[in-house]
Amino acid sequence: CNKGWANPPETCDVYEGQKAGKFDQSRPYASNTGRTDVEGCCWWGRGVIQTTGVCNFGKLNYYLGARAAKEGRYSKYWSVDFCRDPEQICSSSEYKELKWISGMFYWMESVQSYDRGGWRYTVELARFVESGMQGTSFIDAVSGIV
């Protein structure tokens, strides 16, 4: 998905029969720090939730990868430098679970803690479950976070 270098180029888009969620490719999407400069480099999505961008790979490296080990913290994946070789998330033969670990890390770091503009993930999740998981508004909202 979003392989601008492919011939022909491939991009993500809404597909026929899609039940919820959407893509907005009308303009670059800025990170929390305002960066939009990761297009065209090696920071494209990898793993089950598509870890993307310099900041997310950096966080993985800081908490779980080579940087943690280098700075003297315990690191389960001490030999993996997520910043130098982000493809390790999908290609590591030693740590095949990385695609799931990276997705869970993103879910815990960014989705579960989401609390902006009066919309709080944990509150909305409880509301969605308690109402019998009806409708797509919760799914639409979460897809905007991910």
Image (cartoon, rainbow, N blue to C red):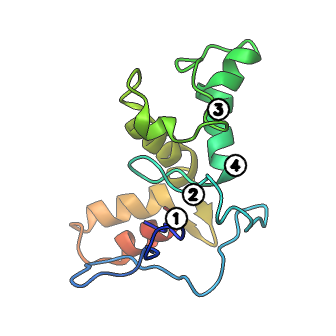
Q: Disc 4 on helix, strand or loop? A: helix
Tag 1–tag 2 contact (CB < 8 Å):
yes
**Given this view, does label 4 or label 2 mark the residue nearer the observer?**
4
In the foreground, 102 or 143: 102
Q: Measure the C-alpha gap from mark 4 to mark 3.
A: 10 Å
The answer to which of marks 1 and 2 sits earlier in the sequence is: 2
Amino acid type indicated by mark 4: Cys
**Number of marks in the rendered image:** 4
Q: Position of residue 135 (x, y in %)?
A: 26, 78
**Residue 120 screen position, x and y as percent:** 53, 62
Q: Which residue is mark 1?
A: 145
Identify the mark nearer the N-term, 4 or 2: 4
The image's mark for residue 55 is 4
Q: CA distance from mark 1 to mark 4?
A: 15 Å
Q: SS for tag 2?
A: loop
Please state which amino acid type lies under the numbered disc 1.
Ile
Q: Tell me if 94 is positioned left or right of 60 in this view.
A: left
Q: Which residue is disc 2 drawn over? A: 114
For the residues labelled 3 and 2, the Cα–Cα distance comes to: 22 Å
**Identity, as a three-letter code, of the amino acid under mark 3:** Asn
Q: How far apart are the two marked residues, 3 and 1, measured between alpha carbons?
A: 22 Å
Name the kind of residue labelled 2 in the image. Tyr
Of the two numbered discs 1 and 4 in the rendering, the one whose residue sits closer to the viewer: 4
Which residue is label 3 attached to? 61
For mark 1, give the secondary structure: helix
Q: Give the residue at x 66% y 38%.
A: 83
Whichever of callouts 3 and 2 sits on the residue coming sooner in the sequence is 3
Instruction: Tell me if mark 4 has few (under 14), some (14-19) or many (20+) residues whose alpha carbon lies within 10 angstroms of its own.
Output: some
The location of residue 125, given as percent across then percent down, is 38, 59
Q: Which is nearer the N-term, disc 3 or disc 1?
A: 3
